[in-house]
Image: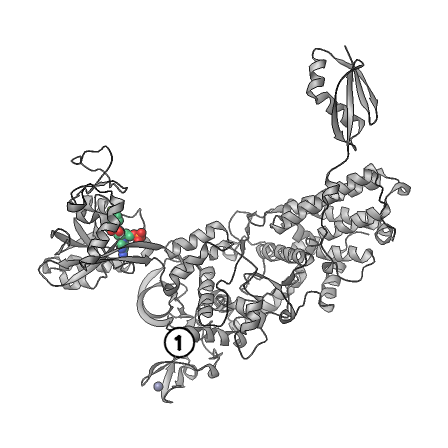
Amino acid sequence: MSYEFQQLEPKWQNFWEKSKVFEMDVSKEFDPFYLLVMFPYPSGDKLHLGHWFVYGLLDSWARFKRMNGKKVFFPMGFDAFGLPAENFAIKKGIHPDVTTTQNVTYMREQFRRMGTSYNWNYTLDTSKPNYYKWTQWVFLELYKKGLAYKKEAPVNWCPSCQTVLANEQVQDGQCERCDSVVARKNLSQWFFKITDYAQPLLDNIERLDWPHRTKAMQQNWIGRSEGTEIIFEIAGSKKTFTVYTTRPDTLFGVTYVTLAPEHPLVAEITAATQQASVTAYIEETARVTEVDRLSTTREKTGVFTAAYAINPVNGEKIPIWIGDYVLYSYGTGAVMAVPAHDERDFAFAKKYKLPVRRVILEDGIDASAAMTTAYTEDGKMIASDKYNGMMSSDVIKAITKDLEEKHIGKFKVNFRLRDWLISRQRYWGAPIPIVHCPQCGEVAVPEKDLPVKLPEDVDFRPTGESPLKRCESFMNTSCPKCGGKAQREADTLDTFVCSSWYYLRFPNVGNNSQAFETKLTNKVLPVDKYVGGPEHACMHLLYARFINMVMKDLGHINFDEPFESLTHHGLVLGADGQKMSKSKNNTVSPDAYVEKHGSDVLRMYLAFGFNYIEGGPWDDQGIKAIARFIERAWRLLEENKTTLTSTTAPKLECSQEDKKLLFVLHNSIRMATRDTEAFQFNTSIARCMELCNALHDYIRATPEAERNTGMLRDTLQKFVILLSPFAPHAAEEWWSWCGKTKSIFLETWPTHSEEFLTLDETTFAVMINGKLRGEFKTPSTATETEVVAQAKEQAFVQKHLAGLNIVKHIFVPKKLVNFIAK
Ligand code: ANZ
Ligand code: ZN
C-alpha cells in the first residue's frame, strides 16, 4: 500500500475534532503560550497558496511548540469588516453579511483540509454584533478620555474607494488598496489621538523582540525631532509667528523665511501687489499630496508675499515667502531659511535669487569663497556676533538658552506622527457610537445601548458619503442626554480599529458582559509570539500598541505591549515574482495540489522549498520529490511494522552500525529542533531526509538477527515525531502503527544526547615500505577504503611518498596501513 491521502487525511481531521486534541480552556491553563497570526480578510479570494504557506507552516510550528511542553493557545478569526469584503459583495450584488458568512465557512473548510490545529472554540468575526459591540466600547473608552475627536482637516481621499484614508494607508501618493492617486480634501473626520502616545510608543520599541527593520520603520514613522521654537515679528506690525528649527545655531544666517501656504498669517500679511499670485499658488498647492510636497527630488517652488519679518537676534529685515515644501501640519508651519546650511533652502535661494550668508566655516575653506552647495556639517561659527569662534554644535544649546532667557524661543520636541484617522464613508464597518443632538451637541451612546447595530436594508454602494446617511431608520434617534430628536453619526470605523484590539478579545470570546476580563487577559497576554507580514509595520502594529497602552492607562490591563516577540513571514509570490492577487491574475489555488498530492505533501513542499522568513516565487518543480520522500518514509515504516510494535528493550552494547545510526538520529534531533524553533523549516526537513536514508542504510546493512531491534524501534518512532509537524496526517497514521491510541501531538519532542554525537575513534599506524612513519585518528566506523584514502592525505605520509608511486597497500583492521611504494 502507499500513502492513500484521500482516505487518511479526512480520517485524522475527524479524529482531531472528535477527540478535541487541540481544544483548550485557556482560563484553566496556568501558563498558556499565546501564539497568534494576523487573521485573514474573508474576501472572495478565499485562501490561496500564499495563505497556505503562512498559516500551514505556522501550524507546524504550533505543533512543534506543543510537543515541547508549551500549552499553546492558538486561536483564529476573521477580519471581516472593511473594503475587501465590501467590494466583493458589491461585485456580486449580494449583501456583505451573506458573502462574508459564506466566505468564512469556506475558509474554515480550507483550514480543516490544511489540517490546522487552531483552538476553534476561540474564534471571532469582527463583523458580528457580539464583536463590534466591543469595538464600539473601545471607541467610547478613548472618547471619554479625550482621545477620540472630530475635526475638519485636509485628509487623503481615494476617489475610487470613495472614502478617506489614514496617512499610513497612502503609499507614494497612492491608495494602499487600489493604487489610485490620492487627493486632498477638507473634511470633518474622526481621529484617535495617537500623538499623545508618541513618546511612550517610541520608548518601548528598543526592548521588543521584533525584527530590526520593523522597529526602525516605526521609529522613523514616529519621527522624534529635538529643536527650538523661535518667535519672529512682522516688520511694521505687532504680529508675530513662530518657526521650528533643529539648527538654531544658524540663526544669523537666515536670509528669508518661508510659511506653509495654508498658514493663517498669509492672508493677513500678503501685500495687494502679490495677492493674485499668492492666491493662485495656494490653489495649486491644495492639489498636491503631502508625500509629494516632501519629496526631495521635486523642484522647490514658492511665491513672495511682499511682507517682511525681523530677525530677533540682529534686527535684520528679511522677506517672507510661501512655499509648498513647508508643511502646515508639521512643527509650526513656518521655517527660517538658511540657504548656506540647508540644501532645500539653498536650491530655493538660487532659484529666486535670494542671498546666501555663511555662518559656519568648513575646515580649510576661506570665509569669502563662493558657495556652490549648502554646508550642512559642524564647524566654527562666523558672522554670528558673540557666538563667533564657538563650535556650531555647542551653539545649538547656548543660543537656545539665550533665546529662552529673552522669552523669544524655547526648546521643543516634535514628532512626525499624526493623529490616526478612524472614520470611513463606507457601509461595511462598525457604526461610530455617537449621537448629534441639536441641544446637547455630540453625545456618546451609553454602554447599555451598545451595540449600535449596522442596519441591514441599506443601499451600500459607495457615493462619497456614508451610505448610512440615506437610511432614515438608522439616522433618526433620540438624544441619550435630553431625549430630544437627534441624528446618529453616519460614518463607520475603519477596520484597523477592529484589528487594533482583537488579540485582547480572543481569550474572552464567550464573554457577553465585557470586552475582556482583566484577570484572564493579564494571565494570557501579552502574545508570546506574533506572526504576520512586514507591510503592517506602521499601521496595524502601531495601532495595536497604541490601543494596548491606552487600555493599560485606563487600568483595564497590566502589560505595556501586546506583542513581545514578532516574526515576519515571507510571501510566496506568483510565478511572475509579483505578490499574488486576483487583479494580477497570478494567484495559485492550493486546491488542485491538495487533490493531486494531498495536504501533507503540499505543506511539506512549502516548508522545504521556501524559506519561511524570505518566501519566493511559486514554482512546483520540487513537489514530486516531496511526494516521493513521503512514499519512501511510508515504505520504510510499513516494511518495519513488526519492529514498530516490538517490546524488546534496546541493547546497551552497540555495534558500529548501531552507533552510526544513533549518530544520525541525535544529529537530526539537535539540528531539527534548533532550526524548527527558528522557523528554518527547510533545513529541519533536510535532517529528516538524512535520517530516513540512514534508517534505510541500517536495515540494508544489518541482517535481521543482528539488529538492535529496541534501538531501531525507538529511532523509527523518533523519526515519525520529527516529521510530524510537517506531515501531521501521515504521522498520526504511522503513530497508530506503533500501537499508540493517543494523538502523536500529545507526545514529547525528543532531545538529543551529546554522547552519541562523538563517534568512537581508532588510531592507525602508517608504514611506508615497512618503516613506521607516524599515526592518525579516524572514526571507528570508517571502511578500509576510507582509512586508506585518509592515510594518503596525512602530511607525514605525503612527505615520505614524494617522488614515489604506491604499488599496493596492506591493511590490518583497527591497527595499521602499510604502503608499498617505488
Ligand atoms: C533652519 C535650518 C537651518 C534647518 C539648517 C535645517 C538646517 P526635522 O528633523 O524633520 O524635524 N522644517 C521645520 N518645520 C518644517 C515644516 N513644517 N515643513 C518643512 N520643513 C520644516 O527637521 C526640522 C527642520 O526642517 C527645521 O530646521 C526646518 O529647517 C525644517 F541649516 O530650520 B531648519
Ligand atoms: Zn440632546
Is residue 144 found left or right of 515 in the rendered image? left
Asked whether residue 322 appears in the rendered view, the answer is: no
Q: What amino acid type should be assigned to the residue bearing mark 1?
A: Lys
Asked whether residue 429 appears in the rendered view, the answer is: yes
Please state which of residues 608 and 741 is positioned toward the viewer in this rendering: 741
Please state which of residues 376 and 383 is positioned toward the viewer in this rendering: 383
- Compared with 816, 138 (above or below) is below
Is residue 357 found left or right of 286 in the rendered image? left
- Count of numbered circles in the view: 1
Residue 250, horizontal then vertical, whole percent: 21, 47
Colour convention of the picture: one colour
Q: Residues within 10 Å of mark 1 (few under 14, many from 20)?
A: few
Answer with the quarter of the image where residue 539 lies. bottom left
Q: Give the residue drawn at x 26%, y 50%.
A: 397
Residue 337, horizontal then vertical, whole percent: 21, 50
Tag 1 secondary structure: helix
Is residue 640 found left or right of 352 in the rendered image? right
Asked if the beta carbon under badge 1 is closer than 8 A to the nearest atom of ligand 2, the reply is no
Residue 340, horizontal then vertical, whole percent: 21, 43
The picture quadrant for ligand 2 comes to: bottom left
Is residue 216 found left or right of 821 in the rendered image? left
- Compared with 401, 394 (above or below) is above
The residue at which mark 1 appears reads as 144
Quadrant where the C terminus sits is top right
Which residue is at the far left?
Answer: 236
Residue 276, horizontal then vertical, whole percent: 15, 59
